[in-house]
């Protein structure tokens, strides 16, 4: 992984803290949102998914869902709808599938990895309703103005349940930080084992694969001390 990519990435610790800041009212930042979602996806997939058994998948999925909701309602971009197990997007005015996903590409996206997806059943129903209205109008370009009702509803809910919501977020964030701390220690031990294996590996292809795994570990849990 390139140095610049590491500099722009976020560890799971940073993701949980950033999510807490967003829930407290911080203005969303596009790159931080994209990197947060990408970090969670990397932690629960690919060659490192065996380390996910030390993390509560439901908790991190909840955070991932919320981050995607913030992303799609906060920045202009384009969306596509896919039926489950299909790589062909549904036509704009076509009937939406019962099961599938939403793909969102930010307008100022510069990387293929900036395109994010979320299952339809993980997206807030108010957001889905707004997307359906856009689809019915024959457009797939969206702006934050398309989600005024979602933001108004969220603000109203925050006013009514502010204390309860804050306590829930605080507890959830504490769980995430604690899990990330434990997993970081395990991941760093693995990083050192991989580093030792790479230094003595004569097979160039195998060594590159090991180095890639080390880079992924650094992205998710930070470089070892």
Image (spheres, rainbow, N blue to C red):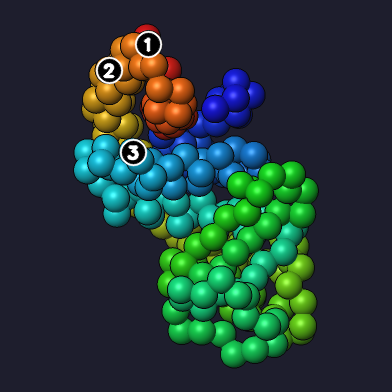
Neighbours of disc 2 within 10 Å: few (<14), some (14-19), many (20+):
few
Q: Secondary structure at mark 3?
A: helix
Label 1 sits on residue: 199
Foreground residue among 72 and 44: 44
Residue 214 sits above or below residue 127 on the image: above
Seen at 68% across and 57% down, the residue is 105
**Image coords of residue 38 (percent x, y):** 51, 44
Q: Is residue 193 visible?
A: yes
Q: How many badges with numbers are in the image? A: 3
Neighbours of disc 1 within 10 Å: few (<14), some (14-19), many (20+):
few
Seen at 71% across and 78% down, the residue is 134
Q: Is residue 172 visible?
A: no
**Image coords of residue 120 (percent x, y):** 48, 72
Q: Quadrant of residue 30?
A: top right
Q: Nearer the viewer, mark 1 or mark 2?
A: 1
| Side of 175 relative to 110 (left or right) | left
Seen at 61% across and 47% down, the residue is 113
Q: CA gap, disc 2 to disc 3? A: 14 Å
- In the rendered image, the quadrant that contains the C terminus is top left
Label 2 sits on residue: 193
* Mark closest to the chain's N terminus, 2 or 3: 3
* Mark closest to the chain's N terminus, 1 or 2: 2
Q: CA gap, disc 1 to disc 2? A: 10 Å
Asked whether the residues under the numbered discs 2 and 3 touch, taking CB atoms below 8 Å apart as contact, a structural biologist would say no
Q: Secondary structure at mark 2?
A: helix
Disc on res. 48:
3
**Image coords of residue 178 (percent x, y):** 27, 31
Residue 102 sits above or below residue 173 on the image: below
Foreground residue among 90 and 32: 90
Asked whether the residues under the numbered discs 1 and 3 touch, taking CB atoms below 8 Å apart as contact, a structural biologist would say no
Foreground residue among 89 and 96: 89
Q: Secondary structure at mark 1?
A: helix
């Amino acid at each position: 992984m390139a140095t610049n990519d590491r500099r722009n990435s976020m560890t799971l610790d940073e993701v949980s803290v950033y999510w807490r800041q967003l829930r407290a009212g911080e203005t969303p930042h596009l790159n931080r949102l994209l990197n947060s979602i990408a970090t969670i996806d990397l932690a629960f997939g690919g060659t490192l998914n065996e380390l996910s058994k030390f993390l509560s998948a439901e908790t991190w999925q909840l955070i991932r869902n919320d981050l995607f909701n913030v992303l799609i309602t906060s920045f202009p971009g384009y969306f596509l709808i896919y039926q489950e197990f299909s790589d062909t997007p549904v036509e704009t005015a076509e009937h939406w599938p019962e099961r599938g996903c939403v793909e969102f590409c930010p307008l100022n996206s510069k990387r293929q990895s900036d395109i994010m997806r979320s299952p339809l059943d993980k997206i807030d129903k108010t957001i889905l309703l707004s997307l359906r209205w856009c689809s019915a109008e024959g457009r797939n370009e969206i702006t934050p103005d398309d989600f005024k009702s979602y933001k108004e509803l969220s603000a109203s809910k925050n006013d009514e349940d502010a204390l309860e919501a804050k306590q829930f977020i605080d507890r959830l964030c504490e769980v995430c930080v604690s899990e990330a701390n434990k997993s970081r220690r395990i991941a760093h031990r693995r990083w050192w084992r991989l580093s030792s294996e790479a230094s003595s590996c004569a097979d160039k292809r195998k060594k590159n694969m090991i180095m890639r795994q080390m880079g992924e570990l650094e992205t998710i849990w930070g470089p070892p001390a």
